[in-house]
Image (cartoon, grey):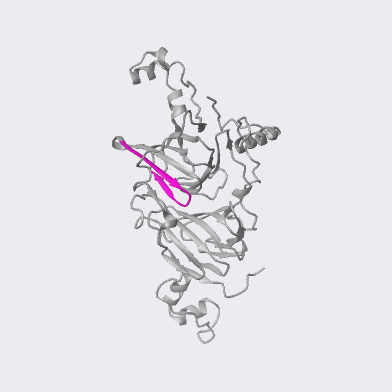
Amino acid sequence: MQHTDPANSTADSDRRTFLAGVAAFAGAAGATVAPRAAAAAGAPAASGAPHRHSFRLSALAPQLVTRAGSRTQVTDREFPALRGMSLYKLAIGIGCFREPHWHANADELGYCTAGELLVTMFSSGNRRDAFRVRAGEMYLVPSGSFHALENVGSSRAEVVVAFSHERPEDFGISGAVGCMSAAVMGNAWGLDASAVAGITHAPVDVVFDKSDGPTEVPASADAANEWRFAVEAAKPLIANAFGSARLARKDTWPALRTQSMYSLRLGGEGMREPHWHPETAEMGYVLAGRSRMTVKSPFDGPGSVDTYEIGPGDMYFIPKGYPHHIENLGSDELHFLIFFDRAMPEDIGFTAGIPAFPRRIVAPTLGTTAAALPRYPELAADAMIVRKRNPTEV
């Protein structure tokens, strides 16, 4: 069994070694760790604003690549804007697994984007769970719960994972057992130290490895389980000709504690109206399509506005209360995974928020007169997803 330490990354001169590792994961033999990508590779997208809210995750090489899987992580080290949230992308090869592990300081909320995973959990009260997650389904692992992800499908499995901390702490069973002496582990299992001499004795996590035997999926793996949620099969909160939003939040998935997720789709004429979230930050990941966003930071001047474009594989982060919008720049469907750091996120939009105030106040605030102020709809509730009536600005 090979141990791979992501902290001991190779130098930039070993780029060829990294490429060999990528090739190995694609199907060739061998395993290696990817070098740390240069800071510019996944840096916040240039926008001229001092507070940059987007991150070119699509340009960031995985920090860990082995024969069994890869991990790309975005914490506040890579994306300094992050607060209370972070995002990982995992890929697990056929017949391989993410080792049993736990996170000391963060809940884990995963969305399967490809393949099939068997999630096995051991949690407080000696509770045991094992359930299958397919593309378009989600899983939740509370902080500290022991869990593993195993590819039980016929193709590579991929998952986007959001954590409830900007720098999640990770403990694998390989390193946790490896830091104990043979005598200690022998005592725990009621064995002589000589009987456990052949197991790992290094405090470094394996992270990914290949299963030593055929995959076995319990008969109950597809039964209802509180830690799994089929978000894409859920009825959308809103669905119109311009887009839809399906919600994984406390009222639809009671197991959620510190996080939630919206699966947002916008058609070619769709736009998420300008809005903000009073009590939650927002971290988004682009699955498909190209988008433009504008975010206002809490100070005046040209640098307070950050407008940027993001595409598949990119992400962004918006602190709570910051106004922003999302618009589809193409004719194809735009699909976002939007994670929040509250189990029940709420938002305030321009479409219902502005009409809540009399026109005699709104008009001078917006630099015009009550007579000249546009006759916007007097909505009682936010529209949320609206039509792009005007052509996209260049």
Residue drawn 59% across and 40% down?
62
Q: Quadrant of residue 249?
A: bottom left
| Count of numbered badges drawn on the protein | 0
Left or right, 329 with respect to 161, comes to: right
Which of the pair 47/290 is nearer the observer?
A: 290
Q: Position of residue 90 (x, y in %)?
A: 52, 42
Position in image of residue 157 (x %, y %): 52, 43
From the viewer's perspective, is residue 28 above or below residue 336? above
- Residues rendered magenta in the picture: 127-141
Q: Is residue 65 left or right of residue 140?
A: right
Q: Residue furthest left?
A: 125
Closer-to-camera residue (114/311): 114
Above or below residue 193? Residue 354 is below
Q: Nearer the viewer, residue 360 or 272?
A: 272
Front position in the image: 307 or 26? 26
- Whether 381 is drawn above or below 345: the answer is below
Inspect the magenta stretch and tell me whether residue 131 lies in it.
yes
Q: Position of residue 44 (x, y in %)?
A: 61, 51
Q: Residue at x 44, y 56 (%)?
A: 232
Q: Position of residue 236 (x, y in %)?
A: 42, 63
Residue 288 placement: quadrant: bottom right
What residue do we see at 45% from left, 39% from top?
A: 149
